[in-house]
Image (cartoon, grey):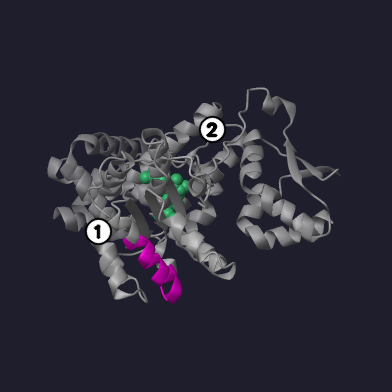
Amino acid sequence: TWGRVCDELQKSVGQNNFTTWIAPLELINLEDGIVSFRAPTKFMRDWVSRNFAEPILSELRRAGVSAERVDISVPLRQVANGAKPAAKPAAMPVKPRKPARAESEPLPGAPLDARFTFDSFVVGKPNELAHAAAKRVAEGGPVTFNPLFLYGGVGLGKTHLMHAIAHELQVQRPDLRVLYLSAEQFMYRFIQALRDKQIMDFKEMFRSIDVLMVDDVQFIAGKESTQEEFFHTFNALVDQGKQIVISADRAPGEIKDLEERIKSRLSCGLVVDLHPTDYELRLGILQTKTDAYRTEYPDLQIAPGVLEFIAHRISSNVRILEGALTRLFAYASLIGREITMDLAQECLKDQLRQSERKVTVEEIQRKVAEHYNVRLSDLVGPKRLRAIARPRQVAMFLAKSLTTRSLPDIGRRFGGRDHTTIMHGIRKIEELRATDSQLAEDIELLRRLLES
Ligand code: ADP
Ligand code: MG
Protein backbone atom coordinates (compact mmCIF):
# COMPACT_ATOMS: atom_id res chain seq x y z
CA THR A 1 0.00 0.00 0.00
CA TRP A 2 2.75 2.45 0.96
CA GLY A 3 4.21 2.12 -2.53
CA ARG A 4 0.91 3.08 -4.08
CA VAL A 5 0.40 5.90 -1.59
CA CYS A 6 3.86 7.17 -2.58
CA ASP A 7 2.82 7.30 -6.22
CA GLU A 8 -0.14 9.47 -5.27
CA LEU A 9 1.98 11.64 -2.98
CA GLN A 10 4.40 12.35 -5.81
CA LYS A 11 1.50 13.86 -7.67
CA SER A 12 0.01 15.80 -4.79
CA VAL A 13 3.17 17.35 -3.29
CA GLY A 14 5.24 17.50 -6.47
CA GLN A 15 8.22 15.47 -7.60
CA ASN A 16 10.80 17.78 -6.07
CA ASN A 17 9.22 17.83 -2.61
CA PHE A 18 8.69 14.12 -2.77
CA THR A 19 12.30 13.22 -3.46
CA THR A 20 13.67 15.70 -0.96
CA TRP A 21 11.36 15.03 1.95
CA ILE A 22 9.21 11.93 1.64
CA ALA A 23 11.39 9.42 -0.21
CA PRO A 24 14.03 9.40 2.60
CA LEU A 25 11.40 8.38 5.18
CA GLU A 26 11.35 4.80 6.30
CA LEU A 27 7.94 3.43 7.20
CA ILE A 28 8.27 1.46 10.42
CA ASN A 29 4.80 0.79 11.66
CA LEU A 30 1.12 1.46 11.19
CA GLU A 31 -1.00 0.76 14.25
CA ASP A 32 -4.01 2.29 15.97
CA GLY A 33 -4.13 5.05 13.40
CA ILE A 34 -0.54 6.08 14.10
CA VAL A 35 1.86 5.99 11.18
CA SER A 36 5.46 5.74 12.35
CA PHE A 37 8.40 6.73 10.21
CA ARG A 38 12.09 7.07 10.73
CA ALA A 39 13.73 10.17 9.24
CA PRO A 40 17.47 10.47 8.66
CA THR A 41 17.88 13.77 10.54
CA LYS A 42 15.98 15.83 13.06
CA PHE A 43 15.71 18.73 10.68
CA MET A 44 13.96 16.49 8.19
CA ARG A 45 11.72 15.17 10.93
CA ASP A 46 10.65 18.68 11.94
CA TRP A 47 10.16 19.83 8.40
CA VAL A 48 8.11 16.80 7.37
CA SER A 49 5.92 16.98 10.49
CA ARG A 50 5.31 20.63 9.85
CA ASN A 51 4.65 20.49 6.14
CA PHE A 52 3.83 17.01 4.94
CA ALA A 53 1.97 15.23 7.75
CA GLU A 54 -1.41 16.27 6.36
CA PRO A 55 -0.77 15.21 2.75
CA ILE A 56 0.58 11.87 3.97
CA LEU A 57 -2.44 11.24 6.16
CA SER A 58 -4.96 12.19 3.53
CA GLU A 59 -3.35 9.99 0.88
CA LEU A 60 -3.30 7.07 3.32
CA ARG A 61 -6.95 7.60 4.12
CA ARG A 62 -7.80 7.76 0.46
CA ALA A 63 -6.11 4.38 0.10
CA GLY A 64 -8.46 3.04 2.76
CA VAL A 65 -6.01 3.08 5.68
CA SER A 66 -7.25 4.60 8.91
CA ALA A 67 -4.53 7.09 9.80
CA GLU A 68 -4.84 9.88 12.32
CA ARG A 69 -1.36 10.88 13.30
CA VAL A 70 2.13 10.85 11.87
CA ASP A 71 4.92 10.02 14.25
CA ILE A 72 8.50 10.47 13.13
CA SER A 73 11.57 9.31 15.00
CA VAL A 74 15.21 10.01 14.34
CA PRO A 75 18.22 7.74 14.98
CA LEU A 76 19.42 8.42 18.52
CA ARG A 77 22.65 10.25 17.91
CA GLN A 78 20.64 12.86 16.01
CA VAL A 79 18.28 13.57 18.88
CA ALA A 80 21.07 13.75 21.42
CA ASN A 81 21.88 17.41 20.80
CA GLY A 82 18.51 18.69 21.89
CA ALA A 83 15.89 19.20 19.22
CA LYS A 84 13.03 21.53 19.85
CA PRO A 85 9.57 20.72 18.59
CA ALA A 86 8.48 22.62 15.50
CA ALA A 87 6.61 25.84 16.09
CA LYS A 88 2.92 25.41 15.45
CA PRO A 89 0.99 28.23 13.85
CA ALA A 90 -1.10 29.93 16.48
CA ALA A 91 -4.82 30.08 16.11
CA MET A 92 -6.35 33.42 15.26
CA PRO A 93 -6.46 35.34 18.51
CA VAL A 94 -9.85 36.56 19.50
CA LYS A 95 -10.45 39.03 22.27
CA PRO A 96 -14.00 40.08 22.96
CA ARG A 97 -14.28 43.81 23.55
CA LYS A 98 -17.24 43.42 25.82
CA PRO A 99 -19.08 40.34 26.93
CA ALA A 100 -22.01 40.85 24.54
CA ARG A 101 -23.00 37.56 23.06
CA ALA A 102 -22.42 38.19 19.37
CA GLU A 103 -19.05 39.73 20.01
CA SER A 104 -17.64 37.07 22.23
CA GLU A 105 -18.10 34.47 19.56
CA PRO A 106 -14.91 33.52 17.81
CA LEU A 107 -14.17 35.52 14.70
CA PRO A 108 -14.08 33.38 11.58
CA GLY A 109 -10.56 34.39 10.65
CA ALA A 110 -7.78 32.43 9.08
CA PRO A 111 -5.10 31.00 11.37
CA LEU A 112 -1.99 33.14 11.74
CA ASP A 113 1.44 31.79 11.01
CA ALA A 114 3.46 32.22 14.20
CA ARG A 115 6.63 32.72 12.16
CA PHE A 116 5.31 35.79 10.32
CA THR A 117 6.26 38.55 12.77
CA PHE A 118 7.95 41.92 12.44
CA ASP A 119 11.01 40.41 14.11
CA SER A 120 11.46 37.88 11.36
CA PHE A 121 10.79 40.36 8.56
CA VAL A 122 14.00 41.62 6.97
CA VAL A 123 13.77 45.23 5.85
CA GLY A 124 15.54 46.55 2.76
CA LYS A 125 15.04 49.26 0.17
CA PRO A 126 12.43 47.31 -1.81
CA ASN A 127 10.07 46.89 1.15
CA GLU A 128 10.90 49.64 3.63
CA LEU A 129 7.83 51.73 2.90
CA ALA A 130 5.45 48.81 3.16
CA HIS A 131 7.14 47.79 6.39
CA ALA A 132 6.90 51.28 7.88
CA ALA A 133 3.22 51.57 6.98
CA ALA A 134 2.47 48.15 8.43
CA LYS A 135 4.29 49.10 11.63
CA ARG A 136 2.19 52.23 11.93
CA VAL A 137 -1.05 50.27 11.65
CA ALA A 138 0.25 47.75 14.18
CA GLU A 139 0.60 50.45 16.82
CA GLY A 140 -3.18 50.53 16.96
CA GLY A 141 -3.28 54.30 17.35
CA PRO A 142 -5.75 56.64 15.67
CA VAL A 143 -6.40 55.72 12.04
CA THR A 144 -4.25 57.93 9.80
CA PHE A 145 -4.71 56.29 6.42
CA ASN A 146 -7.54 54.05 5.39
CA PRO A 147 -7.23 51.59 3.89
CA LEU A 148 -3.60 50.56 3.85
CA PHE A 149 -3.27 48.90 0.48
CA LEU A 150 -0.22 46.67 0.03
CA TYR A 151 0.55 45.24 -3.35
CA GLY A 152 3.34 43.39 -5.12
CA GLY A 153 4.28 40.19 -6.90
CA VAL A 154 3.99 36.76 -5.39
CA GLY A 155 6.33 35.84 -2.53
CA LEU A 156 7.40 39.37 -1.64
CA GLY A 157 6.00 39.47 1.90
CA LYS A 158 2.43 40.81 1.76
CA THR A 159 0.93 38.01 3.81
CA HIS A 160 3.89 38.06 6.17
CA LEU A 161 3.32 41.76 6.91
CA MET A 162 -0.40 41.32 7.48
CA HIS A 163 0.15 38.49 9.96
CA ALA A 164 2.81 40.60 11.64
CA ILE A 165 0.26 43.41 12.08
CA ALA A 166 -2.19 40.97 13.67
CA HIS A 167 0.46 39.56 16.04
CA GLU A 168 1.62 42.99 17.08
CA LEU A 169 -1.89 44.34 17.65
CA GLN A 170 -2.55 41.41 19.92
CA VAL A 171 0.23 42.76 22.14
CA GLN A 172 -0.35 46.51 21.73
CA ARG A 173 -4.13 46.56 21.71
CA PRO A 174 -5.60 43.33 23.07
CA ASP A 175 -8.92 45.14 23.36
CA LEU A 176 -9.32 45.39 19.59
CA ARG A 177 -11.14 42.83 17.50
CA VAL A 178 -8.79 41.98 14.68
CA LEU A 179 -9.83 39.83 11.75
CA TYR A 180 -7.47 38.54 9.10
CA LEU A 181 -8.74 36.47 6.20
CA SER A 182 -8.20 35.96 2.49
CA ALA A 183 -10.63 37.38 -0.04
CA GLU A 184 -11.41 33.81 -0.97
CA GLN A 185 -12.46 33.05 2.60
CA PHE A 186 -14.52 36.20 2.66
CA MET A 187 -16.40 34.94 -0.37
CA TYR A 188 -16.79 31.48 1.07
CA ARG A 189 -18.25 32.82 4.33
CA PHE A 190 -20.55 35.11 2.42
CA ILE A 191 -21.91 32.32 0.24
CA GLN A 192 -22.30 30.09 3.27
CA ALA A 193 -24.24 32.82 5.07
CA LEU A 194 -26.51 33.23 2.06
CA ARG A 195 -27.11 29.51 1.90
CA ASP A 196 -27.80 29.18 5.60
CA LYS A 197 -29.97 32.31 5.58
CA GLN A 198 -27.73 33.97 8.13
CA ILE A 199 -26.77 37.01 6.16
CA MET A 200 -27.76 39.35 9.01
CA ASP A 201 -25.37 37.57 11.37
CA PHE A 202 -22.69 37.80 8.71
CA LYS A 203 -23.18 41.53 8.31
CA GLU A 204 -23.33 42.11 12.04
CA MET A 205 -20.15 40.16 12.64
CA PHE A 206 -18.17 41.97 9.97
CA ARG A 207 -19.38 45.34 11.21
CA SER A 208 -18.22 44.62 14.75
CA ILE A 209 -14.56 44.35 13.77
CA ASP A 210 -12.00 47.01 14.68
CA VAL A 211 -9.27 46.01 12.27
CA LEU A 212 -10.15 44.10 9.11
CA MET A 213 -7.42 42.62 6.93
CA VAL A 214 -8.29 41.04 3.59
CA ASP A 215 -5.49 39.27 1.74
CA ASP A 216 -5.33 38.83 -2.05
CA VAL A 217 -8.34 40.97 -2.80
CA GLN A 218 -7.87 40.44 -6.57
CA PHE A 219 -9.63 37.15 -5.97
CA ILE A 220 -13.06 38.79 -5.82
CA ALA A 221 -12.62 40.41 -9.24
CA GLY A 222 -15.42 39.28 -11.50
CA LYS A 223 -17.48 37.90 -8.59
CA GLU A 224 -20.31 40.36 -8.51
CA SER A 225 -22.34 39.69 -5.41
CA THR A 226 -19.19 39.14 -3.31
CA GLN A 227 -17.81 42.46 -4.55
CA GLU A 228 -21.06 44.13 -3.64
CA GLU A 229 -21.00 42.77 -0.11
CA PHE A 230 -17.32 43.58 0.27
CA PHE A 231 -18.00 47.15 -0.79
CA HIS A 232 -20.73 47.57 1.85
CA THR A 233 -18.63 46.01 4.59
CA PHE A 234 -15.71 48.21 3.62
CA ASN A 235 -17.79 51.40 3.69
CA ALA A 236 -19.50 50.57 6.96
CA LEU A 237 -16.15 50.03 8.68
CA VAL A 238 -14.50 53.11 7.19
CA ASP A 239 -17.50 55.20 8.28
CA GLN A 240 -17.01 53.96 11.83
CA GLY A 241 -13.34 54.91 11.66
CA LYS A 242 -12.17 51.29 11.74
CA GLN A 243 -8.84 50.34 10.20
CA ILE A 244 -8.73 48.28 7.02
CA VAL A 245 -5.69 46.62 5.46
CA ILE A 246 -5.89 45.11 1.99
CA SER A 247 -3.38 43.25 -0.14
CA ALA A 248 -3.37 42.41 -3.82
CA ASP A 249 -0.99 41.29 -6.52
CA ARG A 250 -1.27 44.65 -8.31
CA ALA A 251 -2.35 48.26 -7.79
CA PRO A 252 -6.08 48.93 -7.30
CA GLY A 253 -6.45 50.54 -10.72
CA GLU A 254 -4.86 47.54 -12.41
CA ILE A 255 -7.21 44.89 -11.10
CA LYS A 256 -9.41 43.75 -13.96
CA ASP A 257 -13.12 43.09 -13.48
CA LEU A 258 -13.27 45.06 -10.27
CA GLU A 259 -15.95 47.72 -10.04
CA GLU A 260 -14.73 51.27 -10.49
CA ARG A 261 -16.22 52.46 -7.22
CA ILE A 262 -14.29 49.73 -5.38
CA LYS A 263 -11.05 50.61 -7.13
CA SER A 264 -11.41 54.23 -6.17
CA ARG A 265 -12.31 53.32 -2.57
CA LEU A 266 -9.25 51.07 -2.34
CA SER A 267 -7.00 53.85 -3.64
CA CYS A 268 -8.08 56.55 -1.26
CA GLY A 269 -5.88 55.55 1.69
CA LEU A 270 -2.20 54.75 1.45
CA VAL A 271 -1.15 52.56 -1.48
CA VAL A 272 2.34 51.05 -1.19
CA ASP A 273 4.06 48.46 -3.27
CA LEU A 274 6.59 45.83 -2.36
CA HIS A 275 9.28 45.86 -5.02
CA PRO A 276 11.13 42.79 -6.22
CA THR A 277 14.01 42.04 -3.87
CA ASP A 278 17.51 43.24 -4.65
CA TYR A 279 20.76 41.44 -3.91
CA GLU A 280 21.24 43.06 -0.48
CA LEU A 281 17.76 42.15 0.71
CA ARG A 282 18.10 38.59 -0.52
CA LEU A 283 21.40 38.22 1.25
CA GLY A 284 19.92 39.74 4.42
CA ILE A 285 17.05 37.27 4.35
CA LEU A 286 19.39 34.33 3.78
CA GLN A 287 21.62 35.41 6.65
CA THR A 288 18.73 35.98 9.04
CA LYS A 289 17.20 32.63 8.26
CA THR A 290 20.54 30.87 8.55
CA ASP A 291 21.15 32.45 11.97
CA ALA A 292 17.70 31.41 13.12
CA TYR A 293 18.30 27.89 11.87
CA ARG A 294 21.63 27.75 13.71
CA THR A 295 20.04 28.48 17.07
CA GLU A 296 18.06 25.27 16.63
CA TYR A 297 20.67 23.16 14.84
CA PRO A 298 24.07 24.49 15.89
CA ASP A 299 25.98 21.95 13.80
CA LEU A 300 25.28 23.71 10.54
CA GLN A 301 28.38 24.78 8.64
CA ILE A 302 28.26 26.79 5.47
CA ALA A 303 31.39 27.98 3.69
CA PRO A 304 31.88 31.70 3.17
CA GLY A 305 30.46 32.89 -0.12
CA VAL A 306 27.71 30.28 -0.41
CA LEU A 307 24.91 32.56 0.76
CA GLU A 308 26.23 35.34 -1.48
CA PHE A 309 26.21 32.94 -4.38
CA ILE A 310 22.57 32.00 -3.73
CA ALA A 311 21.57 35.64 -3.31
CA HIS A 312 23.07 36.36 -6.70
CA ARG A 313 21.62 33.48 -8.52
CA ILE A 314 18.10 32.97 -7.24
CA SER A 315 15.14 35.06 -8.33
CA SER A 316 13.47 37.84 -6.41
CA ASN A 317 10.63 35.68 -5.04
CA VAL A 318 11.38 35.15 -1.35
CA ARG A 319 9.40 31.93 -1.19
CA ILE A 320 11.65 30.37 -3.83
CA LEU A 321 14.71 31.73 -2.07
CA GLU A 322 13.56 30.17 1.20
CA GLY A 323 12.81 26.90 -0.55
CA ALA A 324 16.37 26.76 -1.85
CA LEU A 325 17.79 27.50 1.58
CA THR A 326 15.64 24.85 3.22
CA ARG A 327 16.80 22.34 0.69
CA LEU A 328 20.36 23.30 1.47
CA PHE A 329 19.75 22.82 5.21
CA ALA A 330 18.25 19.39 4.61
CA TYR A 331 21.27 18.50 2.52
CA ALA A 332 23.64 19.81 5.19
CA SER A 333 21.88 17.85 7.91
CA LEU A 334 22.22 14.72 5.81
CA ILE A 335 25.85 14.90 4.80
CA GLY A 336 27.00 16.22 8.17
CA ARG A 337 29.88 18.34 6.99
CA GLU A 338 30.46 21.84 5.73
CA ILE A 339 28.42 22.98 2.74
CA THR A 340 30.98 24.19 0.26
CA MET A 341 30.29 26.08 -2.92
CA ASP A 342 30.51 22.86 -4.94
CA LEU A 343 28.07 21.04 -2.68
CA ALA A 344 25.68 23.98 -2.81
CA GLN A 345 25.76 23.97 -6.58
CA GLU A 346 25.12 20.26 -6.64
CA CYS A 347 22.27 20.48 -4.15
CA LEU A 348 20.55 23.42 -5.86
CA LYS A 349 21.17 22.53 -9.46
CA ASP A 350 17.46 22.39 -10.35
CA GLN A 351 16.70 25.70 -8.67
CA LEU A 352 19.71 27.32 -10.28
CA ARG A 353 19.00 25.95 -13.71
CA GLN A 354 15.75 27.89 -13.83
CA SER A 355 17.38 31.20 -13.12
CA GLU A 356 20.40 30.42 -15.18
CA ARG A 357 21.02 32.47 -18.20
CA LYS A 358 24.43 31.35 -19.28
CA VAL A 359 26.69 34.33 -18.81
CA THR A 360 30.21 33.81 -20.09
CA VAL A 361 33.43 35.27 -18.73
CA GLU A 362 34.02 36.83 -22.14
CA GLU A 363 30.63 38.54 -22.04
CA ILE A 364 31.40 39.90 -18.58
CA GLN A 365 34.75 41.24 -19.74
CA ARG A 366 33.17 42.93 -22.72
CA LYS A 367 30.44 44.63 -20.66
CA VAL A 368 32.83 45.74 -17.94
CA ALA A 369 35.30 47.15 -20.48
CA GLU A 370 32.47 49.03 -22.15
CA HIS A 371 31.12 50.34 -18.85
CA TYR A 372 34.48 51.65 -17.64
CA ASN A 373 35.57 52.73 -21.08
CA VAL A 374 38.75 50.68 -21.16
CA ARG A 375 40.02 48.46 -23.96
CA LEU A 376 39.22 44.76 -23.75
CA SER A 377 42.86 43.94 -24.51
CA ASP A 378 43.92 46.09 -21.56
CA LEU A 379 41.36 44.50 -19.26
CA VAL A 380 42.90 41.06 -19.74
CA GLY A 381 46.42 42.42 -20.31
CA PRO A 382 49.26 43.09 -17.87
CA LYS A 383 48.87 46.86 -17.14
CA ARG A 384 48.74 47.75 -13.46
CA LEU A 385 47.28 51.25 -13.72
CA ARG A 386 44.48 51.78 -11.22
CA ALA A 387 42.11 52.88 -14.01
CA ILE A 388 42.49 49.47 -15.57
CA ALA A 389 43.23 47.27 -12.58
CA ARG A 390 40.01 48.18 -10.77
CA PRO A 391 37.67 47.33 -13.68
CA ARG A 392 39.67 44.15 -14.12
CA GLN A 393 38.94 43.20 -10.50
CA VAL A 394 35.27 44.00 -10.99
CA ALA A 395 35.23 41.66 -13.97
CA MET A 396 36.92 38.94 -11.89
CA PHE A 397 34.36 39.40 -9.15
CA LEU A 398 31.46 39.16 -11.59
CA ALA A 399 33.03 36.15 -13.31
CA LYS A 400 33.11 34.34 -9.97
CA SER A 401 29.62 35.26 -8.87
CA LEU A 402 27.79 34.90 -12.18
CA THR A 403 29.42 31.84 -13.69
CA THR A 404 30.33 28.43 -12.33
CA ARG A 405 33.94 28.71 -13.48
CA SER A 406 36.67 27.83 -11.01
CA LEU A 407 39.34 30.33 -10.01
CA PRO A 408 42.12 28.73 -12.13
CA ASP A 409 39.71 28.65 -15.05
CA ILE A 410 38.91 32.34 -14.62
CA GLY A 411 42.62 33.08 -14.29
CA ARG A 412 43.24 31.46 -17.64
CA ARG A 413 40.66 33.74 -19.24
CA PHE A 414 42.33 36.78 -17.71
CA GLY A 415 45.53 36.48 -19.68
CA GLY A 416 46.80 33.41 -17.80
CA ARG A 417 46.76 34.84 -14.29
CA ASP A 418 47.29 32.70 -11.24
CA HIS A 419 44.20 31.70 -9.20
CA THR A 420 45.54 33.54 -6.14
CA THR A 421 45.58 36.76 -8.16
CA ILE A 422 41.94 36.21 -9.06
CA MET A 423 41.10 35.47 -5.41
CA HIS A 424 42.89 38.65 -4.35
CA GLY A 425 40.94 40.69 -6.91
CA ILE A 426 37.61 39.29 -5.73
CA ARG A 427 38.43 39.95 -2.07
CA LYS A 428 39.43 43.50 -2.89
CA ILE A 429 36.08 44.19 -4.56
CA GLU A 430 34.13 42.57 -1.73
CA GLU A 431 35.97 44.81 0.70
CA LEU A 432 35.55 48.01 -1.28
CA ARG A 433 31.95 47.37 -2.13
CA ALA A 434 30.99 47.64 1.53
CA THR A 435 32.10 51.27 1.74
CA ASP A 436 32.17 52.53 -1.82
CA SER A 437 28.55 53.00 -2.84
CA GLN A 438 29.45 54.04 -6.38
CA LEU A 439 31.26 50.77 -6.87
CA ALA A 440 28.38 48.82 -5.34
CA GLU A 441 26.00 50.51 -7.76
CA ASP A 442 28.24 49.81 -10.75
CA ILE A 443 28.32 46.15 -9.84
CA GLU A 444 24.59 45.91 -9.35
CA LEU A 445 24.02 47.62 -12.71
CA LEU A 446 26.45 45.37 -14.54
CA ARG A 447 24.93 42.33 -12.94
CA ARG A 448 21.47 43.34 -14.09
CA LEU A 449 22.73 44.07 -17.61
CA LEU A 450 24.42 40.70 -17.80
CA GLU A 451 21.55 38.73 -16.39
CA SER A 452 18.75 40.27 -18.40
P1 ADP B 1 3.13 37.17 -0.57
O1 ADP B 1 1.96 37.15 0.35
O2 ADP B 1 3.54 38.56 -0.96
O3 ADP B 1 2.97 36.28 -1.75
P2 ADP B 1 4.47 35.99 1.66
O4 ADP B 1 4.20 37.00 2.70
O5 ADP B 1 3.66 34.73 1.72
O6 ADP B 1 4.40 36.60 0.21
O7 ADP B 1 6.02 35.62 1.73
C1 ADP B 1 6.56 34.43 1.15
C2 ADP B 1 7.61 33.86 2.07
O8 ADP B 1 8.73 34.71 2.10
C3 ADP B 1 7.15 33.75 3.51
O9 ADP B 1 7.68 32.58 4.08
C4 ADP B 1 7.73 34.98 4.18
O10 ADP B 1 8.02 34.76 5.55
C5 ADP B 1 9.00 35.19 3.40
N1 ADP B 1 9.40 36.60 3.31
C6 ADP B 1 8.96 37.50 2.38
N2 ADP B 1 9.54 38.70 2.58
C7 ADP B 1 10.35 38.56 3.65
C8 ADP B 1 11.24 39.45 4.34
N3 ADP B 1 11.41 40.73 3.97
N4 ADP B 1 11.94 38.96 5.39
C9 ADP B 1 11.79 37.68 5.77
N5 ADP B 1 10.99 36.79 5.16
C10 ADP B 1 10.28 37.21 4.10
MG1 MG C 1 0.16 36.14 0.19
Q: Is 225 covered by the magenta stretch? A: yes
Q: Tag 1: residue type? A: Arg
Left/right placement of residue 210 relative to residue 266 reads right
Element under disc 2: loop
Instruction: Say which amino acid is labelled 2.
Output: Glu
- Foreground residue, 349 or 140? 140
Q: Quadrant of the N terminus?
A: bottom right
**Number of dots carrying numbers:** 2
Q: Which residues are magenta?
A: 220-235
Residue 366 - label? 1
Tell me where residue 264 sits by quadrant: bottom left
Q: Which residue in the protein does label 2 denote?
A: 338
Indicate which disc residue 395 carries. Answer: none
Q: Residue at x 65, y 44 (%)?
A: 48
Label 1 C-beta lies within 8 Å of the nearest ligand 1 atom = no
Say whether residue 418 is left or right of residue 348: left
Please state which of residues 277 and 416 is positioned toward the viewer in this rendering: 277
Front-most of residues 115 and 313 = 115
- Label 2: few (<14), some (14–19) or many (≥20) C-alpha neighbours in 10 Å: some
Instruction: Say which quadrant the C terminus sits in.
Output: bottom left
Q: Earlier in the sequence, mark 1 or mark 2?
A: 2
The residue tagged with tag 1: helix, strand or loop?
helix
Image coordinates of residue 259 in percent, x first then y, are 33, 75
Residue 157 in view in this figure: no
Q: Quadrant of ligand 2?
A: bottom left
